[in-house]
């Protein structure tokens, strides 16, 4: 209970300070504020995907349905954060580059993740038997695990992108004003805490549903 | 070990021959795929006319036609087994990996036949500029291997669900996007006389990664 209140306070404070008090970055100007929301959302999309895939592999190895609970919960939450990242990115693109969507390699990557999550959840929805659903969606998840590095890392590096890279730059250093860096890290921690909490909740719901069905 | 290896290879070869023979009996799948490829090609050519100077559009349209032909026809390899209820018998005589490899080779052959008809027709109907055959066949070949590998795996998964048709296309697409990106890029570069090494490398590594992952996963596919 205490942790949840703490998380709420943390995110509230971080968001207020970020939006009202943090300085602006030269090229981005007023749109700097998007990085406090858009980047954590994109980060969590990838984290959720990784968590889902790890648990899919664990399920195939151990056949414990608890791993499937984690995999499906992570996929649902990942979809949520992915939509958030895509929409915030599109809004930012409109104000910065003049159009909502341009198939810029970064935009393509996030769209691909959106498709992947949706396909995974659609596949899950089409299978009724619990064990078969866990097994087949785990297989698909592992196959997608192969495709993800290609589309996230290889393709964007192959083509020029307009997407700003304030964090991962050629010099490899974190190149931000200290105040911005702290606000950004605070938002990142807050979002991650939010994800961990939602994930735990969702897994508990799955287990309760299964226990109720067994009874 | 050599005996087990040659027994495996024999099983794969037998399954491949069985697939070819049962396909040849009705030719239903082949006819459907060819008809679809020609129909979509006709639609493209009719609507867009001759596109000799638009090699970027040509590259995209070419791979879209191939992708659609794949998505509509590739699921039948496993679905046919499930519907004819011969899957159980097949699993009694061969291991999952052998079955899947046999079907993968069949899908490759199938796609090769469809492409043998579609590619010349495409080049003629759209008035495409001269093709660098070595590079073009390299891109086409590697792209086809990825298409077949992905379709075999997804087909095997989908055959056990209620979804089938529409679900197959939707579930395949994320796995096929890297192929599409690299293949369209490579084809466009081929026509523009730019280097295609990057695209070829991407296609090759993706095909290998997907094949490797599929071979590891087939054992988990059928377990009841």
Image (cartoon, helix red, strand yellow):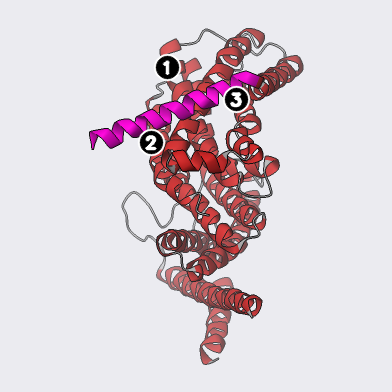
**Residue A142 versus residue A149: which sits nearer the camera?**
A142
Give whichever of discs 3 and 2 has the lower sequence position.
3
- CA separation, marks 1 and 3? 18 Å
The residue at the point 29 percent across, 34 percent down is B5
Q: Local crowd at mark 1 within 10 Å, few (<14), some, or many (≥20)?
A: some
Give whichever of discs 2 and 1 has the lower sequence position.
1
Q: Which mark is residue B208?
A: 2
Task: Report which residue position mark 3 lands on.
Answer: B66
Task: Report which residue position mark 1 lands on.
Answer: B135
Instruction: Give percent across and percent down for residue A206.
Output: 60, 73
Q: Which residues are magenta?
A: B1-25
Question: Which SS class for mark 3?
Answer: helix
- CA separation, marks 3 and 2? 20 Å
User: Which residue appears farthest toward the bottom when viewing the image?
Assistant: A2
Front label number (1 vs 3): 3
**Residue A153 versus residue B40: which sits nearer the camera?**
B40
Badge 2: chain ID:
B
- CA separation, marks 2 and 1? 19 Å
């Amino acid at each position: 209970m205490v942790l949840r209140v703490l998380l709420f306070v943390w995110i509230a404070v971080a968001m207020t300070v970020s939006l009202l008090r943090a300085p602006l970055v030269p090229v981005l100007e007023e749109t700097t504020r998007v990085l406090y929301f858009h980047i954590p959302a994109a980060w969590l999309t990838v984290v959720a995907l990784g968590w889902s895939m790890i648990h899919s592999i664990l399920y195939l190895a151990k056949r414990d349905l608890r791993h499937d609970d984690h995999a499906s919960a992570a996929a649902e939450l990942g979809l949520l954060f992915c939509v958030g990242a895509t929409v915030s990115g599109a809004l930012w693109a409109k104000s910065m580059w003049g159009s909502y969507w341009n198939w810029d390699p970064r935009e393509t990557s996030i769209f691909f993740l959106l498709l992947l999550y949706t396909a995974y959840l659609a596949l899950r929805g089409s299978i009724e038997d619990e064990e078969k659903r866990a097994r087949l969606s785990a297989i698909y998840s592992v196959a997608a695990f192969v495709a993800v590095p290609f589309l996230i890392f290889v393709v964007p590096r192959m083509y020029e992108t307009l997407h700003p890279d304030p964090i991962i730059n050629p010099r490899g250093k974190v190149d931000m004003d200290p105040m911005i860096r702290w606000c950004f890290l605070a938002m990142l921690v807050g979002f991650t805490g939010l994800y961990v909490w939602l994930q735990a909740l969702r897994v508990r719901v799955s287990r309760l549903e299964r226990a109720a069905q067994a009874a | 070990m050599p005996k087990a290896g040659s027994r495996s290879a024999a099983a794969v070869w037998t399954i491949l021959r069985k697939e070819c023979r049962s396909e040849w009996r009705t030719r239903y799948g082949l006819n459907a795929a060819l008809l679809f490829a020609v129909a979509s090609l006709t639609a493209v050519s009719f609507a867009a006319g001759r596109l000799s100077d638009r090699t970027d559009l040509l590259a995209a349209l070419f791979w879209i036609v191939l992708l659609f032909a794949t998505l509509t026809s590739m699921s039948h390899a496993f679905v046919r087994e499930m519907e004819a209820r011969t899957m159980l018998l097949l699993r009694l005589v061969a291991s999952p990996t052998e079955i899947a490899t046999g079907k993968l080779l069949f899908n490759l052959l199938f796609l090769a036949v469809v492409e043998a008809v579609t590619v010349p027709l495409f080049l003629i109907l759209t008035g495409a500029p001269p093709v660098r055959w070595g590079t073009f066949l390299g891109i086409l070949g590697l792209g086809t291997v990825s298409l077949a590998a992905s379709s075999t795996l997804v087909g095997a998964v989908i055959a056990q669900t209620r979804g089938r048709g529409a679900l197959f296309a939707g579930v395949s697409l994320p796995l096929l996007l890297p192929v599409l990106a690299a293949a369209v890029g490579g084809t466009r570069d081929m026509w523009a006389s730019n280097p295609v090494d990057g695209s070829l490398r991407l296609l090759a590594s993706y095909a290998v990664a997907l094949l490797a992952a599929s071979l590891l996963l087939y054992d988990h596919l059928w377990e009841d």
